[in-house]
Image (spheres, grey):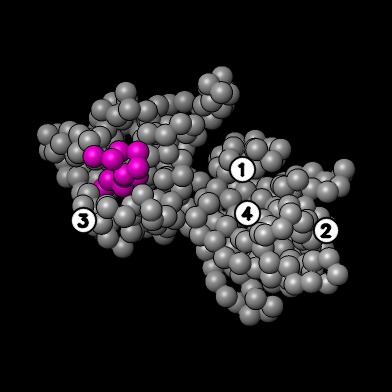
Amino acid sequence: MDRFFVITNIGKDKNLEITNQIKDYLQRKGKQCFLPDTDKYENTCRDSSYGNGALIPGHVDCVIVLGGDGTLLQAARDINGRNIPILGINLGTLGYLTEIDKNNINYALDCLIKDEFETENRMMLDGKIFHEDTFFKESSALNDIVIYRTGALRVINFTIYVNGKFLNNYNADGIIIATPTGSTGYNLSAGGPIVDPKAEITILTPICPHTLNTRSIVLPASDVIEIEIGEGRKSINEIVNVNFDGTDTEKLTSHDRIKITKSIKRTNLVKVMNRSFLEVLCKKMQDQ
């Protein structure tokens, strides 16, 4: 690799100290390193977007992301469709996606320069929102798509269809539709299964279901999932939020639905530490 672009969560590298160290190191090695316009950094902490994929030069070999898993998820959405490998450097706390810590930055950069790395191809989800039967919006997620309640503390009624056939009704505070990558995120906190991120499946996990026999459901990634929002008590119009990877949020009301499919777009994560998912998982569990 010869040409790099750095996306930084300035809240975790406030003076761009680590960012500039990376740039200087790569340039000393005779490589090119591009940074976003520094004038645009001032609002980064308050903005949900850390990088604009359209501003990344077309000849970049790798995007280096500094922050935590949330920063990497946003960056993956920002460059969605560009097919550029991403290396995550963890400046946060718990990092499943950002495998490189501050002590191993130079080692990781050397691996990139010498092409001594692997890439993991991670599946993503597409979600198409329909108000009644009218298409409204489409967005993508590397981790998960979450539907959750707003306002007063009340349960939401969800009707789930798979490949056009009725599957189940849920009465819950919300529901998580997760990729294998997202299985260690909100899905895990809600009691869902941990899945190897290279798998090709989709996980449905209710949030605080109001029944005793409701559990997560694991489906093939090729299945088409549709979730319809039911009416509230006394037939009132229910209002809920749907969220893509923790940032992109839209409102749904009763009889609205979201159609979720495996995306044709993928996220390529660079791996240089030669550690398996089980090794990473074991370490994260021991650190907590």
Q: Which mark is residue 39?
A: 3
Crowding around mark 1 (Cα neighbors within 10 Å: few <14, some 14 to 19, many 20+) is many
Q: Position of residue 243 (x, y in %)?
A: 57, 57
Instruction: Give the distance between the C-alpha atoms of the residues marked 2 and 1, in whole angstroms.
Output: 21 Å
Q: Is residue 263 visible?
A: no
Residue topped by disc 2:
169
Q: Secondary structure at mark 1?
A: helix
Q: Are marks 1 and 4 in contact (CB under 8 Å)?
A: yes
Q: Secondary structure at mark 2?
A: strand
The quadrant of the image that shows the N terminus is: top left
Q: Residue at x 46, y 44 (%)?
A: 70
Tell me the kind of residue under disc 2: Asn
- Closer to the chain start, of discs 2 and 1, is 2
Give the quadrant of residue 86.
Answer: top left
Residue topped by disc 4:
146
Q: Residue at x 22, y 36 (%)?
A: 17
In the depicted view, which residue is nearer to us: 206 or 241? 241
Q: Position of residue 180 (x, y in %)?
A: 60, 43
Please report the bounds of the magenta region as a residue range. 5-15
Q: Which mark is residue 206?
A: none
Residue found at the far bottom of this picture: 134
Crowding around mark 4 (Cα neighbors within 10 Å: few <14, some 14 to 19, many 20+) is many
- Closer to the chain start, of discs 1 and 4, is 4
Tell me the kind of residue under disc 1: Tyr
Give the quadrant of residue 100.
Answer: top left
Does residue 56 sit above or below 268 in this rendering? Answer: below
Instruction: Give the distance between the C-alpha atoms of the residues marked 3 and 1, in whole angstroms.
Output: 34 Å
In the depicted view, which residue is nearer to us: 242 or 142? 242
Tell me the kind of residue under disc 4: Val
Q: Is residue 156 left or right of residue 211?
A: left
Q: Residue at x 29, y 29 (%)?
A: 105
Residue found at the far front of this picture: 152
